Amino acid sequence: MSELNKKFYEVQGISFESDYMKLVVDNKPYEIDLKELAKQSSRLFYASDFHRKQFEIDGAGYGVHWNIIDEHLSIKGLLGISRQAKEKTH
């Protein structure tokens, strides 16, 4: 695959359950507490379930876009929030 066509991340899924955003990226599951995510995205935190489900993953696998609430987050940033939360609990 050429550098121009290389994906940053392969995002297999994004879902919202209870108070968590669940991601599957590069075949690994991640969980983000929405309260932690609120520090980066109050728009997503306060969005309805319907609006949270209206997202697009960009073709390069770099980010997620919720056009309906005008929010754009990088996958790298989301994975960082997930890692930080794990470090706090260990």
Image: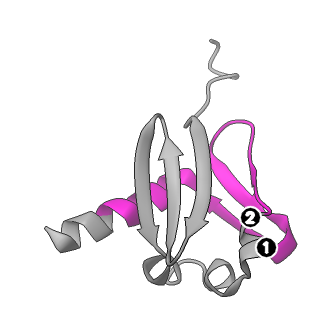
| The quadrant where residue 6 appears | top right
Residue in view at x 86 percent, y 71 percent: 68
Most foreground residue, 78 or 49 = 49
Assess whether residue 20 is covered by the magenta stretch: no
Residue type (three-letter) at the residue carrying disc 1 = Phe
Furthest-front residue in this view: 18
- The chosen color scheme is one colour
Q: Which residues are magenta?
A: 54-83
Give yes or no for contact between labels 1 and 2 (Cβ–Cβ under 8 Å).
yes
Most foreground residue, 17 or 66 = 17
Residue in view at x 60 percent, y 46 percent: 13
- The residue identified by callout 2 is 53
| The quadrant where residue 4 appears | top right
x then y, percent, for residue 9: 55, 37
- The residue identified by callout 1 is 50
For residue 32, the mark is: none
| 35 lies above or below 72 | below
Q: Secondary structure at mark 1?
A: helix
| The quadrant where residue 55 appears | bottom right
Query: Label 1, label 2: how many angstroms apart (C-alpha)?
Result: 5 Å
Residue in view at x 62 percent, y 85 percent: 42
Most foreground residue, 34 or 58 = 34
Q: Secondary structure at mark 2?
A: loop
